[in-house]
Image (cartoon, rainbow, N blue to C red):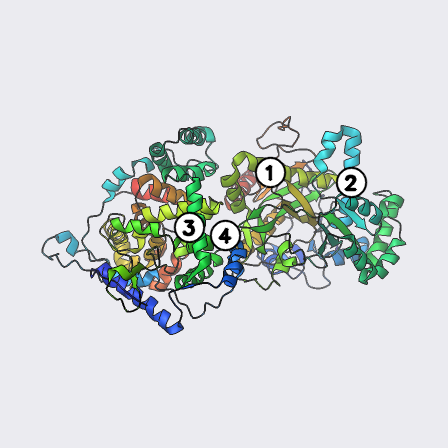
Amino acid sequence: MSRPKNQNYKGHGLSKGKEREQRASIRFKTTLVNTLMDVLRHRPGWVEVKDEGDWDFYWCDVSWLRENFDHTYMDEHVRISHFRNHYELTRKNYMVKNLKRFRKQLEREEGKLEAAKCDFFPKTFEMPCEYHLFVEEFRKNPGITWIMKPVARSQGKGIFLFRRLKDIMDWRKGTAGKKLTSSEAQPARSAVNPPGGHDARSSDDQKDEIPVENYVAQRYIENPYLVGGRKFDLRVYVLVMSYIPLRAWLYRDGFARFSNTRFTLSSIDDQYVHLTNVAVQKTSPDYHPKKGCKWMIQRFRQYLASKHGPEAVETLFSDMDNIFIRSLQSVQKVIISDKHCFELYGYDILIDQDLKPWLLEVNASPSLTASSQEDYELKTCLLEDTLHVVDMEARLTGREKRVGGFDLMWNDGPVSREEGAPDLSGMGNFVTNTHLGCVNDRKKQLRQLFRSLQSQKKASS
Amino acid sequence: MTLTVLKSTSQGSWEKRILKSLNSMCTELSIPLARKRPVGEQKELLNKWNEMGTDEPDLSLFRPVYAPKDFLEVLINLRNPNYENGDSLSFRTHLGLIQVPLKVKDIPELKEFFVELGLTTGQLGIDDSTQVPPELFENEHVRIGQKVLAEQDSAAAQQYIRQGSPTALRAELWALILNISSQPEDILYYEQLKTNVIQHDLLVDSLIYKDVKLTASNDDYYFVFEDYLYQVLLCFSRDTSVLGHFAYNSASPPKSYIRGKLGLEEYAVFYPPNGVIPFHGFSMYVAPLCFLYHEPSKLYQIFREMYVRFFFRLHSISSHPSGIVSLCLLFETLLQTYLPQLFYHLREIGAQPLRISFKWMVRAFSGYLATDQLLLLWDRILGYNSLEILAVLAAAVFAFRAVNLMEVTSLAAAEAVLADLSTLKVMPLLQIFLFATVT
């Protein structure tokens, strides 16, 4: 329960024109992560709430959300850091389903060319219900490598690569065998439950309760872009403030996570080669914590520019914008857009040798623990700016296109870079107000922003 | 085998020391200076050629032959026997560590030398920042760069790059200025060096491994290029064509003699074959180049050329204006002349500025500056064909942090103020120091 004591206010958010009142202090609750704690504790006017106290802001765990969201009353001003059914985007099997459905819809409504813009996820089949479809695809492409991933686990656990059907048949009969039988008994979600309907929710709850391991089999990208002979993926941060209408912000900073060992297809058993999560890399015998294995995305962008030229880099980053926007659009109608909710997603992107970006997955709870000083800086700034955008202090006008390191990427439509009309190029990719991997002079921008907000306020009072 | 050196100049005695150190390591560890690899080992190395970084040989017993600070001690003790104290009054008041009276430029001369870095000339590193519309300078500069490349005009490229190189053109511009063109014979030459590495193991190889593991592999950005570094440096140490640079270097390459034939020239070989003994941090000369060149033989050629034109001057004793001795003196003179309060203060608290800035200059700032800034700096080294800019930048850094430095009371505290240069923007610093400071 989160009832504030003596309040007299109106709702706020990015809806323009509504009055918002300032609060004397903002009571917060959070999970125990050092970066988050540091940011929240240092925020002026924010007070930590003890166990059962009322709160205005909660950076919660998804498990807490699952158990409590449905029976927690929240006043209008209260904010919480997850959407109730975020898993529509963040669980691999649901994400794939939603994307496939969205793609079909696009093809129907706007043609093949438009639909092809959703081809940023490698061919994926849900196991076990799509097993036969998978086998068909498998037989059409002999010799390629596939990757099997559990839908709900993170940090690289439970993942393995395979090239022969025999490998997964063994796996099927083995540990997964029993589990597969029980989940095979359940109908595929999309067949029975219309998205967004009430029924969908209850069966999802059911799914959450049963400790069954669902997997996806995905085409493994065999020609990843390599730097120094090493494979890497990109971690990018996207902040969604609402789904209806869709409002999303893109953070300028991010990083490339390198595999500690050299990439080769000859050793698909060596998970250290193929998986680039820091968590997996940390257990590799080659791992030296002093080394770290991350590049800030600015450095990566510069490296690419010096190798391929600025135009190729522009195209790549604009293709990535396309991934963020399309993926969010695909779950827009499915996710319960509760105005109390916001969510900071960690997108994992893989780039192949043709400089095409692929979506690997979306994380609802990207790691906020810092692996180095540089990482600590990045994450604390990211969190600070997130809180600025959430704006519990009701300082923003709702017309800002940039807050610190966040650029407004989508506001119920494309957001242009300059003031004025949106700049839709005929090429099809939206020319968005995004600056991923560009200079992040957030301190300066925030100073200017808050100063001008203050003077605007004085002028109007 | 033993090593010996024939010249007895101060460079000569420094060389003697290095070789003695190498010799004793050799004896202590009972490792030969060179040996032929057995066939099995050759095969293994060939297989691992692209991932030598995964090797974890036991290097605990190896130490770098010397570190920059050892070299600084040698420079501090340099005296010119021909010099009489009575000659130069101004030099007698030189309070820095370097006691050799070489001619160095003052700020008016530097302003003339570096005229293209002036306030009214467009610069990459300043005029390409996000606030400046690209139409004002950047677009045109890029267009000119493309033209220079199209015409393959090396002299024009050298002039052009004084204002900095656009990221996308840099690799080609540097190759043009250094006259590197990757002909089939160059690739063949590199392959031959590679074969040499496969067939013979040298003691210096372990030193190279150790250096890469200690420096580049621990760097937040260069760790990714570890394998390239081995591929370049191991070949480099076997490249006898590098010996050519000793013709204009006052140093001489160390020699080794076949056992029992000490002193007999017919039985002398250079060791290592390229005559260059790596020191702690040597691999950092190569690391930034990995950002630009990805094909091993091209990367190799570029590095080799950069070494024989510039880097060798940073660790050999000479009177050349780009030699490390002159750079140190230039740095100290600039500081003492234009920031006297700061200089005296640091001297008083036992923090002679050169003790801090020396390592920056010896490494040409590699590993200290952010990569993009470093590349902008090295653009100017190529453009002006001089390393003097390293000394000017070092002084500019001190000027920039002068306020904080005036408050410290120990060498350690001064080191701390200057420990992190990764946020510095080199071009504004240089411009302000040279052109916007009241002298």
**Of callouts 2 and 1, the N-terminal one:** 2
Q: Is residue A245 left or right of residue A37?
A: right
Neighbour class for label 4 at 10 Å: few (<14), some, many (≥20)?
many
User: Is residue A301 visible in the rendered structure shown here?
Assistant: yes
Using the numbered discs, state the Cα–Cα distance from disc 2 to disc 4 in whole angstroms. 39 Å
| On screen, residue B328 above or below A306 | below
Foreground residue among A167 and A48: A167
Q: Secondary structure at mark 2?
A: helix
Q: Mark 2 and mark 4, same subunit?
A: no
Q: Amino acid at mark 3?
A: Leu
Residue at point 67%, 40% (across, down): A323
Nearer mark to the viewer, of 3 and 1: 1
Nearer mark to the viewer, of 4 and 1: 4
Residue at point 27%, 51% (across, down): B246
User: Tag 3, which chain?
Assistant: B
Instruction: State the residue position of label 2.
Output: A100
Nearer mark to the viewer, of 3 and 4: 4
Q: Residue B225: which disc?
A: 4
Q: Residue B184: which disc?
A: none
Q: Is residue A75 left or right of residue B368?
A: right
User: Is residue A12 visible in the rendered structure shown here?
Assistant: no
Q: Mark 3 and mark 4, same subunit?
A: yes
Q: Amino acid at mark 1?
A: Leu
Instruction: State the residue position of label 3.
Output: B369
Using the numbered discs, state the Cα–Cα distance from disc 3 to disc 4 in whole angstroms. 17 Å
Instruction: State the residue position of label 1.
Output: A316
Foreground residue among B228 and A311: B228
Q: Position of residue A427 (x, y in %)?
A: 64, 28
Nearer mark to the viewer, of 2 and 4: 4
